[in-house]
Each structure stands twice: as structure tokens, then as C-alpha cells.
Amino acid sequence: MKTESLLERRTAAVPRGAFNIAPLFVESASGSKIRDVEGREYLDFCGGIGVMNVGHCHPAVVSAIQDQAARLIHSCWHVAMYEPYVELAERLNALVPMPGPNKTLFLNSGAEANENAVKIARAYTKRAAVAVFERGFHGRTLLTLSMTGKVDPYRRGFGPFMPSVFRLPYEPFFAPADADATTVAGEAMIALDHLFSYQTEPDRIACLVVEPVLGEGGFLPIHPAAFRVLRDVCTDRGILLVADEVQSGFGRCGAYFACERYGIVPDMILMAKSLAGGMPLSAVTASAEIMDAAQVGGLGGTYGGNPVAIAASLAVLDVMEREKLPERAEVIGARVMELFERMAARNACFARPRGLGAMRGVEVVDPVSGLPDAERAKRLVAAARDRGLLIMTASGNVIRTLMPLTISDEELDAGLRILDDAAASVEEPTPAEATRVPA
Ligand SMILES: Cc1ncc(COP(=O)(O)O)c(C=O)c1O
């Protein structure tokens, strides 16, 4: 088998730290399907971790990449400029919910977008500190790892981290959507007061970076009342509110940006992943006043806003508009939620279905204690893969959906049927659970 020998070569040549969720090598992909080197086809509910909202190898994206590659692959923005960079900046400046005039900087990855957001916020506010959330994920570079709010596997052994990063608890901010708004708002105020009273003074905080829907942290949408409190407190205290929409953006949550679903206007939006249909590209967008705070030469990099990635992104924007993918996300999400609610109703292994648009999750838990059960979640993912569906977890025990938004109704139904079947296969108590006496 080709896969076996590739796995052997992979083990010998590539560090184990660069993890894989499946022993699978891809040969090609199209739309919502991936074909492996054995010729086996899988429905893809991972989308390269939220990158393929327009689907694999969308013809419009492929053609834009081919055209651009034949004309100019790289000149470096700082050496010789090119129009598509400006055009994409103009389109994103108009697309974000901030009134403008806005400006956009292009980089290569979500982590780099977060890094630059902090640099720009510091330059603009002349303050040093950064506020973030437990369970937040902002990347794996040392600054963004300092911001990322989970020890295992991200931070373990990699410290010391950047000082002046302060962390808010994820609860009450990410309380369930049906939690009482007044209670959540009150508790959110208390948590912020704690931050300002016991950790750092608010006028030292340059920015507060929040994912409107926690991605790696478990597909938890922020509670609307808590988001409103964050907006108001940031305005009152002169703190920039930064929406990290790297995973929740670009149509995934039923709008171009999840914050639009809440009617919250952040000061800065960070984009990556589905921004460029699989090409490495990220963006930081904010008002011209904020973005121009950094001095000439203070921002950039060799590859940021590479012409081929920019061309792909322009094509992605056209596809999203033409195929109305943000609206489609809502339809997909409703069908996924139907299944997740059914799973939670029929078996105690599944709990707390949630999400926004097509960014949906359901927890796999120990049926007796109700505690997170990452082992059972792993078995579910493997059972789905055996049946021809690629799906992955967030935060260990949360089954999450990141299928292309271009997925057909038939493919979606087929994928959900497999998921249902795989879920049923892990519902039986394990021998250890069967003999355990409830506490
Ligand atoms: C919300 C969020 N921010 C930042 C990142 C980091 O992006 P990248 O892996 O492109 O550096 C991720 C990646 O999963 C993410 O989900």
C-alpha cells in the first residue's frame, strides 16, 4: 500500500510535532471531496481547517491562480507594487462592517495577522498590554502563542511568553446563547472589573482580541450581551476591540464576518483561512487612522500579499458573492444542527450542540460524568473516516463542521448520514463504563 510506505517516510523525515489527524495522503481534491493516494474518496467536513469555504480547486480560483502565475508570481510589494493588491484592499475596506475610510495590510497567515494587529494597536494607542480569552487561539508564533489560551498541546514547553498579555475567563463571555442576557452582561462586567483591578490598569491595554466564535477553543459563539459589554467597555477605556475572524470569517457564520451577526462593529478585523481559497494570505483591516499609526517601513514582509494569493482571493470574493455562500452557510448550519440536536437528545454521549451559521459543534462527553471525552470523540472521527467522511474535533472533544459552503444538498445529506452512523457506533458504553458504578 502506498499510504504505508509514505507513512514510514513521513515518520523518518518530518517531526512528530507537525501533527496529523488522519493517516491519509491526498492525491487530489475537488469541491467537497478529497481523493487519497489509494483512490479512496472522502466527503470533506474539515476544509483544510476552515480554509475551503469556496470548495477545493474551485474553477474560478484555479483559473485566477493560473492567469496570475503566468504573468507575475512575485515581485515583493515593497520592491515593485501591483494593482491586484490595491484592488483587494479596496474591496475588503468596503466589505468590513467598520464605516471607514479603512485600510488593509496583507500578510501570510492568521498568526501574522494577529502579530501585526498587536503592533498596530500598540503604535496607535501608545500602550503595551493585550487582553485575550481563555480557550482563545491566535496562532503558534511566540507572540500569538502568548495570546493563545490553552496549555496542551500549544504552549507546553515553549515559554517564557510575552509579558503584558492578560487573560479573561471564557465564561461568562461564551455562555450558551439562551443564558439570561442581564446576568451574562453583569458577570462580564465583573470579569472586566477583575482584570482592571487585579491584573493591569485599563489605560495600559492597547487592544482586546476576541474570536466572535471560539474556533480551536470549542466552537463556542460569544454571548450577544457579553459582546456588547466588550464593545462598550473598550470604547469607554480607549482599548481597540480586535475581532479575530480567521476561522469565523469569510461566510462561515452566515455573513462575511461573524461580528455582523451580532451587530457589533469592531475596531479591527483579522482575516486568513478562507480569504484566499487555499493560498496563504491574511489581512488586517481597520480605519485609516489606526492603520497609519505604524511608521513607514514598520509593517510588511517578503511574501505578504503575494500576487498569486491576492488573485485567488479576488476570485474567492467573486464566488462568494455570485454563489451567495454566506446565505448558504445558514442553510447548511440548520441541517447540521438538526442532527447534533438529535444526537444529544438520543444519547448522553453528546451534549451542548451550538454554533453560528455553518460553524457548528457538539461535545462528546462521558455519558455518566458528563465530562469531556476526547477518546470517544477520536473513535467517532475514526469511525466517520472508515465510512468515507473526514471530520475533526476542536478542543479535543468537540465535533466541528467546516465543510465547503459550496457543498451540494446531496453531499451534505450523505455526510450527515455518515456522521450519524459513526456517532451511533460510539454510543455503546465501553466495558469500563458498563461496569462503573455511578458516583
Ligand atoms: C481564530 C484563529 N486565529 C488565528 C489562527 C492562526 O492562523 P494560522 O494557522 O494561519 O497562523 C487560527 C488558526 O486556526 C484561528 O483559528
Image (cartoon, helix red, strand yellow):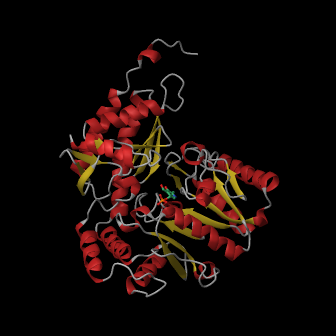
Q: Is residue 52 visible?
A: yes
- Viewer-proximal residue among 51 and 249: 51
* Picture coordinates of residue 145, whole percent (x, y): 59, 55
Q: Which residue is rendered at x = 55% and y = 44% of the image?
A: 176
Q: Residue furthest front?
A: 12
Residue 68: image quadrant is: bottom left
210 above or below 177?
below
* Picture coordinates of residue 141, whole percent (x, y): 56, 59
* Picture coordinates of residue 106, whole percent (x, y): 48, 74
342 above or below 102?
above
- Viewer-proximal residue among 299 and 364: 299
Residue 414: image quadrant is: top left
Using residue 101 as the reference point, say whether residue 82 is left or right of it: left
Quarter of the rendering occupied by the N terminus: top left
Q: Residue furthest left?
A: 39
Residue 6: image quadrant is: top left
Quarter of the rendering occupied by the C terminus: top right
* Picture coordinates of residue 258, whole percent (x, y): 49, 60
293 above or below 58?
below
Q: Which residue is rendered at x = 54% and y = 55% of the image?
A: 140
| Total count of labels | 0
Using residue 135 as the reference point, say whether residue 31 is left or right of it: left
Q: Which residue is rendered at x = 58% and y = 66% of the image?
A: 115
Q: Is residue 245 visible?
A: no
